[in-house]
Amino acid sequence: MRQFKFKPARVARSQSMFDTIEEPVTVEMAKNIRACMLLWLCSGFMIDVHLPILAAMVSAWSALLSSFEEVRQVLCDHGTILDVKVIRKLAYRYAERARVVQQMGLLPLNEEDNLQGRRVVISTDGGRTRLREKKRGPRTAKGRTRYHGAWREPKLLIIYVVDAHGKQEKSFAPFIDGGFNGPDGLFLLLKGYLKSLCIQKADKVLFVADGAHWIWNRVPGLIKALGLNPESV
């Protein structure tokens, strides 16, 4: 376990609008300062927990912009100065908590997300992207870790609503998600979304996909797990 060392100053300085008062730090005062610092560290004081509005704003900009450096610059323009490492940590922690809430089926839904009497389209497919995987060996001349740009296939899903003419309804914001946990992980994620949206109240449920076996071999089990009426699928 990492040990935190804190050495308080020998003089405590308090400043008001009239004057500045200085007094020597006693042993008892130093112990209290160390205790407060230890309590502060052990309580897990983090920006993303105690300042959720800032964490949400940082995470939103991280998703919209192309790099954490751009996020840092935008925040700096708005008067918030954060290091790139802090921004990265905030975004990753926020994403982890969002995924936990998602897996628990506690999705924050709006009134427009009601599927009662609607035609719902569910589609899944595989994508293609490159991931940075660490490469063994010495670092580069600039001290950076080498990596492989390996190609991987994420599994993706989308849930949206169409009208009687088959056109997508703009009043319903589609749900788009995916991951690298394979077909079983994707269908588990899809099941959580559909349960939260109360898919049983939909008028029609349409599954749209290509002929991939990993999709259609799992659709019957998903329909049974959700308790959908076969006539409405």
Image (spheres, rainbow, N blue to C red):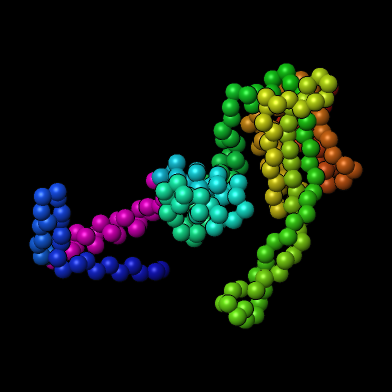
Q: Quadrant of residue 113?
A: top right
Residue 35 rendering spot, x and y as whole percentages: 24, 59
Up the image or down, 6 lies above or below 36; here it is below
**Residue at 70% of width from left, 61% of height from top?**
131
Residue, far front? 77
**Residue at 73% of width from left, 34% of height from top?**
159
Mark yes or no: residue 49 visible: no
Residue 169 rendering spot, x and y as whole percentages: 73, 25
**Residue at 74% of width from left, 45% of height from top?**
156
Q: Quadrant of residue 171?
A: top right
Up the image or down, 1 lies above or below 16; here it is below
Please name the predominant secondary structure of the magenta segment in the image. helix
Residue, far right? 211
**Does 203 sit left or right of 16 as displayed?**
right
Query: Can you say which quadrant of the picture contains the C terminus?
Result: top right
Q: Nearer the viewer, residue 100 or 46?
A: 46
Up the image or down, 32 lies above or below 200; here it is below
Up the image or down, 124 lies above or below 165; here it is below
Query: Can you say which quadrant of the picture contains the N terminus?
Result: bottom left
User: Magenta stretch: residue 230 in it?
Assistant: no
Q: Which residues are magenta?
A: 27-50
Mark yes or no: residue 135 visible: yes
User: Magenta stretch: residue 31 in it?
Assistant: yes
Residue 74 rendering spot, x and y as whole percentages: 51, 50
Residue 182 rendering spot, x and y as whole percentages: 74, 51
